[in-house]
Image (cartoon, rainbow, N blue to C red):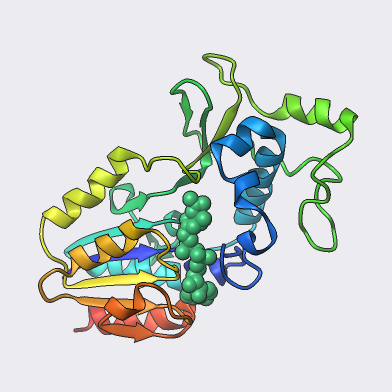
Amino acid sequence: MRVLVITGAGVSAESGIPTFRGKDGYWRNLDPARLATPEAFAKDPRLVWQWYRERRERIRKSEPNPAHQAIAKLAQHAQDFLLVTQNVDDLHARAEWEGNTLVRQNIVQIHGDIFITRCSHCDFVDAGRGGSPEPPAPGTIDSNSGRLRSIAPTSAQAEQEEEEIPKCPRCGALVRPGVVWFGEQLDLGEVQRVENFLDEGACDFALVIGTTAAFGYIIDWALRAIASNGELVEVNPDETSLSRFATHLIREPAAVALPRLVDELVTQ
Ligand code: OAD
C-alpha cells in the first residue's frame, strides 16, 4: 500500500490547538498581516515573537490525539508512506503507535516548524528545538480570554522584551520562528521531497485531513498522488475546495474518523 497523507490545522483541533479559518480560528480574531508576514516582523518583532511564544506554550501543553496516533499506525503498515503537514506544531512527530513514532524521513512540515528558530538576516538556523521555551512575558496574556492583552505594551516592558528576542549568534540580527509566512516561498528542499515521493509512483490512497486546502499545491499534490486510480479520502466536518475531487468524503472530526479509517485500510 502506497499512501500520501496531507494534514492541516483540523487534525490538531481536538488537541486544543486553534485552527486558522474555522470557528474561533486564529485568523477570525487576529490579523495575519500583523502576525504572519516578514513585513509584520520588521515592523513589530516583539508582537510577532510573543504570538509565536504563546503558540509554542500552548503546543507544549497539548498532546497528540487519536488522529495523530492513527496516522503513526498507518505509517507502520504502509509500504510507502509520506505525511505532508501544513502544521508547525510537533504533534505528528510526538504521536506514538505501539511505542513507535513517525520517522523524520516520513514527515514534511511544508510550512515549517515553530520550535525551530532562524536568523531574520543570515542563514543561521537553530534547530535545537529551543525556540526560547519560556512562557510569554508577565501581563501579556489576558487570563480570561487567554489572548494577547494589548498590542502596545508600556515602554518599560518594550525595552525589556525587545532584549528578550534572541539575537543571531553569527550576525547579531533578530532571530525569527522557523515557519513560512505569507508572501514567503516554501522551502525548496521540502517541496522536492514531496515531488520525489509523487514521482516514485502513484498512491493507492491520498488522505487529506483537517484542511481548507486554501493553497493550490495541496490540491495539486493530492490529485497527482492518486493520478491513475487511487482513492482520495477527505476527512473534514466541513466542505472544502478539495471536496469535489474526493472519491470518499468523511464528514467527521479526525480523532473520531481516523482510527476507524486506518483500521479499515490496514486490514484490507
Ligand atoms: P484552516 O483553519 O484553514 O482549516 C482547518 C480545517 O479543519 C477546516 O476545513 C475545518 O473544517 C477543519 N476541521 C476543524 N476541526 C476539525 C476536526 N476536529 N477534524 C477534522 N477537520 C477539522 O487550516 P489549514 O487548512 O491548515 O499557513 O490552513 C492552511 C494554512 O493557512 C496554515 O498552515 C497557515 C494558515 O494561514 C500559514 O500561516 C502560512
The answer to whether residue 156 shows anywhere in this view is yes
Q: Quadrant of the N terminus?
A: bottom left
Can you say which quadrant of the picture contains the C terminus?
Answer: bottom left
Q: Position of residue 202 (x, y in %)?
A: 12, 65
Which residue is nearer to you in this view: 69 or 85?
Answer: 85
Q: Residue at x 37, y 43 (%)?
A: 186
Q: Is residue 97 left or right of residue 78?
A: right
For image coordinates 29% across by 70% down, the residue present is 74
- Please count the marks in the image: 0
Q: Is 143 placed above or below 162 here?
A: below
Q: Quadrant of residue 209?
A: bottom left
Eyeballing the image, is 150 above or below 5? Answer: above
Residue drawn 57% across and 45% down? 36
Q: Is residue 91 visible?
A: no
Q: Is residue 197 left or right of residue 139?
A: left
State left or right for residue 105 relative to residue 200: right
Question: Image quadrant of residue 201?
Answer: bottom left
Q: Is residue 116 above or below residue 234?
A: above
- Residue occupying the point 79% across, 40% down: 137
Residue 212 horizontal side relative to residue 58, left or right:
left
Q: Position of residue 71 (x, y in %)?
A: 36, 68
Q: Is residue 61 above or below residue 264?
A: above
